[in-house]
Image: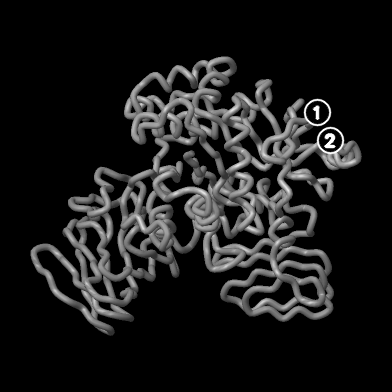
């Protein structure tokens, strides 16, 4: 059995913490591990690390590697093995077809291989019970079914899709499963209430199990343009990926197939698809408040307050959501969190960087934070991790001045190489090759002042790069 983890989403519904350049699956909101790490650890209770494949895109490649490498049970040692980089955003159906082709061509899987499909950003507990459901799903899938995990709803939820199951019940290893009559997209509140009262609807968890043979047959019947791509080689499929339709697996196959069955999922499940959902899973104080950071809450009840650097004080609030980041603060009523995506869309329309970018940007070598910027200058704080280095590069339109505030850095400027230590500095003229690196055992922290007529991150010409980013544009460091 193989597992495909989908880790390419942008997570806009948890803005401002989740943004395109650092989305939800990499956040640590319910503990010290990211949602992707939690997903991998759940699967490792049932599968070996060689059986887990992560689908993501090139922008998130090093986030995925960093998260997986930090798990002792995986520790891929910065290998790209079993990480598939989608060349374009094409929703789940093309991504799954690409994953199936990878399993067949690169891993030698036969058509009777069972594949378990999992999103990368859900919460499931207790995790020790999860392998039982993977085993049940595998046994059912071997009979030619496509298995979905249906979660019994406990409230009318408008942010989830729903599955209507029939009274046609079957049993496998003591577990009942049901034929699925139809998939329903996210309903309005009145329809959601009707589903709850009807009693024959599950939430669609987004987790599926199927054999390679079955999913290829169903793609052939209902999405032949995607099915045809599987006949190509994996490399050819990558090249043609952007031409594939932008469609989800639900729309492409699940809503049409008569082979879909629902396995009732009795564990706690939450897709963390909104701030309301996150509030439900986090620990609360005696007044029902979720508080993280430097928070003082007076006469405040049922409120989520996630602080960052500022002191946050509230008085007389009830059922609110407050999320603070370096450059944006979200304040909303609980129950209105689904409209966060409207904020993101408006920010995009206005060409605001806050829509997709954080003040801090993570790179394979560390991170940089924009402290201040003007028309002809930009100030950054750069953190370089031990034994990492930036590319050897140059800029046409800006000079740079570096001041080391923590640790020691090896710098290359033109044909000179030197060390600069705390409270020492170096100057890089325009059009001069340069590099920063950290050969030490502790992170190096540097304040960088850029000056020039253009400070865009696409003013980079790379000559050498240990992370394989040549050629690459619109990316820093």
Which circle's residue, 1 or 2, is located before the other in the chain? 1
Q: Residue furthest left?
A: 415
Q: Residue at x 42, y 55 (%)?
A: 63
| Secondary structure type for disc 1 | strand
Q: Tell me if residue 340 comes above or below residue 172 in the rendering.
A: below
Q: Which residue is mark 1?
A: 166
Indicate the quadrant containing the C terminus: top left, top right, bottom left or bottom right. Answer: bottom left
Please say whether residue 353 is visible from this viewpoint: no
Q: Which mark is residue 200?
A: 2
Label 1 Cα neighbours within 10 Å, binned few <14 / some 14-19 / many ≥20: some
Q: Check if mark 1's residue and mark 2's residue have beta carbons within 8 Å.
A: yes
Q: CA distance from mark 1 to mark 2?
A: 7 Å
With respect to residue 110, does 302 lie above or below? below
Q: Nearer the viewer, residue 239 or 381?
A: 239
Locate residue 280, reporting x and y percent: 74, 60
Q: Residue at x 75, y 32 (%)?
A: 178
Q: Quadrant of residue 218?
A: top right
Classify 10 Å Cα crowding around label 2: few (below 14), some (14-19), many (20 and above): some
Q: Position of residue 96 (x, y in %)?
A: 50, 33
Left or right of 314 on screen, residue 472: left
Residue drawn at x 31%, y 77% is 442
Tell me if I can see residue 357 in this picture.
yes
Seen in the picture, residue 96 relative to 383 is either above or below; the reply is above
């Amino acid at each position: 059995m193989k597992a495909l983890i989908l880790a390419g989403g942008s997570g806009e519904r948890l803005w401002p913490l989740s943004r395109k350049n650092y989305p939800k699956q990499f956040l640590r909101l319910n503990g010290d591990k990211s949602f992707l790490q939690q997903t991998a650890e759940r699967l490792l209770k049932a599968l070996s690390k060689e059986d887990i494949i992560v689908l993501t895109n090139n922008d998130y490649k090093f986030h995925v590697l960093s998260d997986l490498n930090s798990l002792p049970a995986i520790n891929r040692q910065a290998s790209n093995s079993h990480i598939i980089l989608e060349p374009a955003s094409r929703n789940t159906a093309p991504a799954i077809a690409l994953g199936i082709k990878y399993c067949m061509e690169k891993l030698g899987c036969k058509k009777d291989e069972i594949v378990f499909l999992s999103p990368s950003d859900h919460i499931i507990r207790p995790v020790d019970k999860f392998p039982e459901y993977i085993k049940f799903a595998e046994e059912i899938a071997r009979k030619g079914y496509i298995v979905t995990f249906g979660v019994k709803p406990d409230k009318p939820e408008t942010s989830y899709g729903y599955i209507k199951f029939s009274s046609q019940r079957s049993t496998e290893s003591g577990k009942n499963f049901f034929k699925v009559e139809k998939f329903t997209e996210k309903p309005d509140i009145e329809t959601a209430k009707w589903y709850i009262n009807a009693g024959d609807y599950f939430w669609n968890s987004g987790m599926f199990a199927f054999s390679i043979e079955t999913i290829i047959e169903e793609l052939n019947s209902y999405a032949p343009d995607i099915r045809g791509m599987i006949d190509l080689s994996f490399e050819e499929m990558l090249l043609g990926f952007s031409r594939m339709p932008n469609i989800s697996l639900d729309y492409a196959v699940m809503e049409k197939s008569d082979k879909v069955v629902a396995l009732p999922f009795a564990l706690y499940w939450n897709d963390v698809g909104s701030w309301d959902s996150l509030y439900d899973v986090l620990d609360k104080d005696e007044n029902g408040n979720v508080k993280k950071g430097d928070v003082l809450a007076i006469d405040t009840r049922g409120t989520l307050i996630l602080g960052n650097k500022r002191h946050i004080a509230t008085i007389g609030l009830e059922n609110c959501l407050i999320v603070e980041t370096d450059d944006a603060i979200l304040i909303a009523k609980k129950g209105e969190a689904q409209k966060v995506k409207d904020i993101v869309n408006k920010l995009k329309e206005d060409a605001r960087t806050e829509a997709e970018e954080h003040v801090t940007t993570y790179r394979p070598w560390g991170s940089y934070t924009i402290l201040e910027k003007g028309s002809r200058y930009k100030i950054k704080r750069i953190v370089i991790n031990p034994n990492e280095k930036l590319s050897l590069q140059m800029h046409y339109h800006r000079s740079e001045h570096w001041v080391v505030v923590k640790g020691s850095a090896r710098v290359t400027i033109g044909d000179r190489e030197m060390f600069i230590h705390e409270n020492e500095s170096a100057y890089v003229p325009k059009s001069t090759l340069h590099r920063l690196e950290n050969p030490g055992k502790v992170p190096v922290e540097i304040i960088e002042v850029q000056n020039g007529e253009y400070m865009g991150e696409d003013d980079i010409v790379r000559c050498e790069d240990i992370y394989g980013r040549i050629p690459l544009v619109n990316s820093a460091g």
